[in-house]
Image: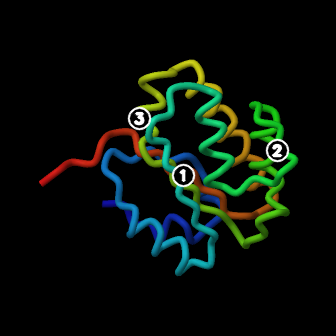
Amino acid sequence: MKDWAALFGSYLKSGVYPVTRSADADIRNAALSGGLEFVEVNLKGVTGKKSFIKKAAGGLGFPAYFGMNWDAFSDCLTDMAWRPAAGYVILFKDYYMFKAKAPADAEVAGRIFDSAVLYWKGRKAPFFIVLVEKAPCST
C-alpha cells in the first residue's frame, strides 16, 4: 500500500503512477487532506482516442472551447485556469481497458501525461496522474 499523503506532499514527487488495485478512497482522501484538487475520470467503455478524449474532457470539466483532439487535451492539462487549485490529482479508472483496446492511443495519452507533469513541476505545483492498470481484485 502506497503512502499517498506522503507522495502528494511534494511537487517534486509529481508523476504518473500506475496502480494495480484501485484505492480510490485513500487516494481521494490523501489528495483532499493535502489541499489538492482530486478528479476521477471513469474510462469504462473507452475503446480509442475519441471516446478517451470525450470521457477525459467530461470528467475534468474542460471548458466549452475544448477542441476534442490531442493538442487541445495537452493544452487543457497544462492550463487549468478554469479549475484553479494548489495542485491536482487525477485518477483514471479502468485505464487498463483503454490501454488494452487502443495501445497506440494510450501511448500518446501517456506522453501527454508525462509532459503535463514536467510542466507543473517546473511551476512547483503538485500534479499527479494515477492510472488504474488492472481490474480491482474481488474478495
Under mark 3, the amino acid is Tyr
The crowding category of the residue bearing disc 2, from other C-alpha atoms within 10 Å (few below 14, some 14 to 19, many at least 20), is some
Distance in Å between CA atoms under marks 3 and 2: 25 Å
Whether residues under marks 3 and 1 lie with C-beta atoms below 8 angstroms apart, the answer is no
Q: Earlier in the sequence, mark 3 or mark 2?
A: 2
Residue type beneath disc 2: Phe
Gap in angstroms between the C-alphas marked 1 and 2? 17 Å
- Residue at which label 2 appears: 66
In which quadrant of the rendered image does the C terminus lie?
bottom left
Give the number of the mark in front: 3 or 1: 1
Circle 1 residue: 41
Q: Where is residue 54 in the image (x, y as percent from the top left)?
A: 65, 40
Identify the residue at horizontal 48%, vertical 31% (top origin): 98
In this view, which residue lies farthest toward the top? 104
Query: Which residue is found at the position 83% from the left and 51% from the top?
Result: 64
Asked if the residue under mark 2 is in contact with the one under mark 3, i.e. CB atoms within 8 Å, the reply is no
Q: Up-down: is 42 above or below 38?
A: above
